[in-house]
Amino acid sequence: MITWGLSAGGHDAAVSVLRDGEIVFAAHSERYSRRKNDPQLCWPLIRAAFMHGEPDRIIWHEKPWLLKTRAAYAGDWDTVWDHSIRRQISGLFLDKVPLLTVSHHQSHAAGGYYTSGFRDAVILVVDAIGEWDTLSIWEGREHEIYKRASVRYPQSLGLFYSAMTKRCGFKPNEEEYIMMGLAALGDPQRLQQQMRDDIMEVLPHWPFFRLRHNLHRGCQWWLPAETNAADIAAAAQYLYTTVMVSIAAYARDMVGSNNLVLAGGCALNCVTNSTLADTNIYDRMWIMPNPGDAGNSLGAALAHHGEHVQWQGPWLGHNIPGDYPVKRALSVLGMGQLVGVANGRAEFGPRALGNRSLFGDPRDPDIKSKMNAAKKREAFRPFAPVIPQELAGMYFDLLDQDHSYMQYTVRCKQPDLFPGIVHVDGTSRLQTVSRAQHPNLWELLAGWYVMTECPMLVNTSLNIKGQPLVNTEADAEAFTSEYGIPVFCRD
């Protein structure tokens, strides 16, 4: 049985293919269309999915009629009249395939739980909007998931964060992670009370927050004379994290599990994830490496499958064959230069984890400015370290969680030695690598350690700001040609 999960129509469309309970393919539309966060499915992506088998059934990631009712309530008439699954897959040779739907938050919950390996869990889904749900608590027991509580539009913790992202001058539903990085530069106290008074009240009981306005279209009207975006970001991040901790504790008492599955686009907030992990409300946490809407393509398929699957990692997209370019990459890194690697299957998710990565030397005091200039990013933006798992505890204050996928920030023990990977607050968004998990990346790091006695590399995504990650070998060649940074696809 081959099941396709589809997510499209909102932002960051994707396709996942499940064959007899095995995840065999998952990829973003943007990587094939070359349109950042492309909301529409494109033929090159569908063609790539067909290579893994024609679907016996398609599972759509939301309930269109529920979505239309909420859109009508919000006055979004374009969505009411134009949102049709068949229209979105028209011309993609899928018209005769049986089509089923699951709810948006059920897709999020299933994608997280059925890849977690947990036999019981609290499943906390937080995003801007599903159909009506904006936050939901689910219980996972063996192969079943049940919704226990929810918050509905227009009350939305995710919309609050997106509105503040827009207020800081960034693009909502895309650049929340930039605001998260900016927050470390601000004072979380200076504007916090006014934000509570004007925007979001923090409550001592469920649901622990109340928006004073519908923030679906932002809050550009708030404090128009306030130009310190860092302080706005810091206050928003503080309030968001405060509410999330309260909700997580409440969900733990409601469901009675020591395991937390975090899902939805808000699960990409690694600062809040770290606070949740550090509170020890839960013993273990799992965040599927693509917890946002693109990940709902996999979540929709898993919701219909209704059983746990073996999670082998997020390397599920387009394959560039050949030996991983360890020797070629080391030769360039040894000269103090940046180097790109595009090899193997592309990552499913927003973060490059070794197969579509740009690497650099974290000891170089100028590496941040070099990389930010090369990627055309804001100068304050931090970069992540990648380090062999067995060495990580020597250099970072690790949480008792899996650090494989850049989902948590931790404190660097020797920040002066590695200025390239430490943010202004002394933390790093860490990626650890075991030899079993990614032997090629581990070999690159081992070779770098032998050559330099430096245990880690800077690892960032192989793209320029506003563009999708490199996907194919042709993309890699174009990147080198346009930006002058060597990208190797094989040794």
Image (spheres, rainbow, N blue to C red):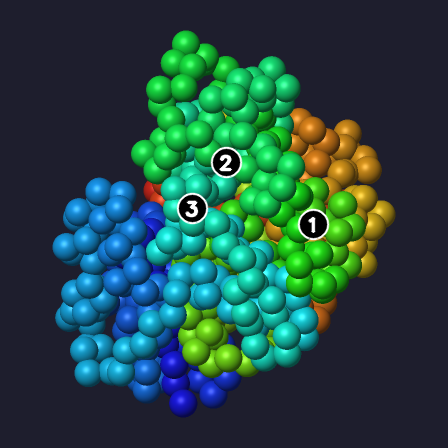
Q: Residue furthest right?
A: 394
Relative to residue 56, is residue 214 depicted above or below? Answer: above
Pick whichever of labels 3 and 2 is earlier in the sequence: 3
User: Image check: 233 left or right of 214?
Assistant: right
Mark-to-mark CA distance, 1 and 2? 18 Å
Q: Residue at x 63, y 19 (%)?
A: 189
The residue under label 1 is 249
* Amino acid type for the residue under numbered disc 1: Ala
Label 2: which secondary element: strand
Mark-to-mark CA distance, 1 and 3? 21 Å
Q: Quadrant of the N terminus?
A: bottom left
Q: Quadrant of residue 120?
A: bottom right
The residue under label 2 is 210
Label 1: which secondary element: helix
User: Image check: 19 left or right of 334?
Assistant: left
Residue 224 in the image: state x and y as whole percent.
Answer: 39, 14
* Amino acid type for the residue under numbered disc 2: Arg
Q: Look at the image and tell me whether residue 56 can be seen.
A: yes
User: Image check: 50 left or right of 378?
Assistant: left
Q: Residue at x 60, y 15 (%)?
A: 190
Q: Residue furthest top?
A: 225
* Amino acid type for the residue under numbered disc 3: Ala
Which label belongs to residue 12? none
The residue under label 3 is 128
Q: Quadrant of the C terminus?
A: bottom right
